[in-house]
């Protein structure tokens, strides 16, 4: 099985390693290689990879909007977010999907089954996926907290039609961060700039960063205060396994996913933004 990871520029990336480790554990021939492609050349690159027999590709954040535009067929999450993080090639062409919302929902749901209130910290590429995931999880009130409140308001306005049943709002200046569940979707420091979330105000926190040498500073401080939370390894690996499940048309065993998660956590060299996955 030939798989690809397409990125616009250089940088560390855990996703190909997670996919390759899973293929080895499954005992399946195949590999995932990384390709550096400019946005203007993405269409040509996708055509070439399909002609070479690639089963699918995962796209880094900056290319996902263009990828969705190029795919005539898009999954529901890709339509809701307006971007595609994964493309599957078949006889009919290329199908674009966004798998991160379901991955966040799976990991968050295992920690907090039915949150009434939830918080999204920051405006990184994963912020929109986090909002959709929390709404799908059943959160009735979702607060977006960010330095740029106008941009946060635009995000809320864009996603409201995609989140029926949930009330989306922007955190007011000086208001406390409160909720049963929080997702940090930015560059790793927004939580510190906004004011450290207190353990007695947030039930569980997930940071969408994959640390290789220590967890994000705000999450470490949150845990030191007695808070419960985790970094982005679980969400990244669940995204990778969902890609393989889609490309293989069969589920990945739970125990295999756990082994890949342990390998990614042990093998990382430095923090990588999950919003690229």
Image: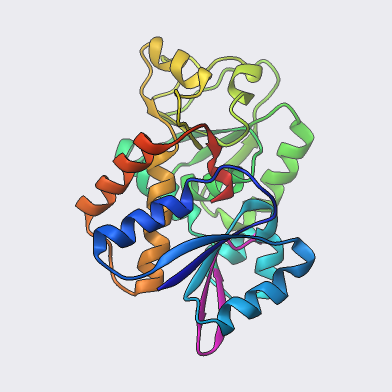
Q: Tell me the magenta residue range.
A: 82-96
Q: Is residue 156 visible?
A: yes
Q: Which residue corresponds to the image point at 29% horizontal and 69% vertical from the top-left?
A: 28
Quadrant in which residue 147 is drawn: top right
Q: Which residue corresponds to the image point at 69% horizontal and 55% vertical from the top-left?
A: 8
Looking at this rendering, what residue extends furthest in the left direction? 255
Task: Please name whichever residue, 111 or 91, is drawn nearer the observer in this view of the structure.
Answer: 91
Q: Could you say where residue 40 lies in the image, as x and y percent from the top left?
A: 79, 66
Task: Please name whichever residue, 5 or 158, is drawn nearer the observer in this view of the structure.
Answer: 5
Q: Which residue corresponds to the image point at 66% horizontal and 18% vertical from the top-left?
A: 193
Residue 86 in the image: above or below residue 108: below
Quadrant in which residue 6 is drawn: bottom right
Residue 36 in the image: above or below residue 148: below
Q: How many marks?
A: 0
**Horizontal arrangement in the rendering, residue 238 relative to residue 127 (left or right):** left
Q: Could you say where residue 175 lies in the image, as x and y percent from the top left?
A: 63, 18
Q: Is residue 201 visible?
A: no
Q: Could you say where residue 165 lies in the image, as x and y percent from the top left?
A: 51, 51
Q: Quadrant of the N terminus?
A: bottom left
**Horizontal arrangement in the rendering, residue 88 relative to residue 148 (left or right):** left
Residue 88 in magenta stretch:
yes
Q: Which residue corresponds to the image point at 52% horizontal and 32% vertical from the top-left?
A: 271
Looking at this rendering, what residue extends furthest in the top direction? 225
Quadrant in which residue 241 is drawn: bottom left
Prevailing SS of the magenta stretch: strand
Q: Could you say where residue 180 lies in the image, as x and y percent from the top left?
A: 41, 29
How are the colours assigned in the image?
rainbow
Residue 258 in magenta stretch:
no
């Amino acid at each position: 099985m030939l798989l690809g990871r397409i990125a616009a520029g250089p940088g560390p990336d855990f996703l190909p390693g997670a996919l390759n480790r899973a293929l080895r554990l499954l005992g399946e021939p195949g590999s995932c290689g990384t390709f550096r492609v400019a946005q203007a050349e993405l269409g040509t690159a996708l055509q070439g990879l399909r002609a070479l027999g690639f089963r699918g590709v995962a796209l880094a954040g900056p290319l996902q909007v263009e990828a969705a535009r190029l795919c005539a067929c898009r999954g529901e999450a890709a339509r809701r977010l307006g971007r595609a993080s994964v493309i599957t090639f078949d006889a009919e062409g290329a199908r674009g999907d966004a798998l991160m919302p379901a991955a966040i929902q799976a990991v968050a749901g295992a920690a907090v089954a039915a949150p009434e209130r939830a918080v999204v910290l920051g405006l990184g590429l994963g912020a929109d996926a986090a909002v959709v995931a929390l709404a799908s999880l059943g959160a009735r009130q979702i607060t977006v907290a960010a330095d740029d409140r106008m941009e946060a308001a635009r995000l809320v306005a864009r996603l409201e039609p995609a989140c029926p049943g949930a009330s989306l709002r922007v955190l007011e200046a000086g208001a406390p961060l409160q909720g049963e569940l929080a997702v940090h979707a930015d560059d790793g420091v927004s939580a510190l700039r906004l004011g450290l979330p207190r353990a007695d105000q947030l039930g569980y926190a997930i940071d969408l960063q994959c640390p290789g040498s220590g967890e994000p500073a705000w999450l470490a401080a949150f845990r030191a205060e007695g808070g419960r939370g985790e970094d982005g390894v679980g969400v990244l690996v669940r995204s990778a396994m969902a890609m393989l499940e889609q490309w293989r048309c069969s589920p990945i065993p739970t125990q295999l996913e756990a082994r890949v998660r342990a390998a990614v956590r042990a093998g990382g060299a430095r923090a990588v933004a999950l919003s690229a996955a």
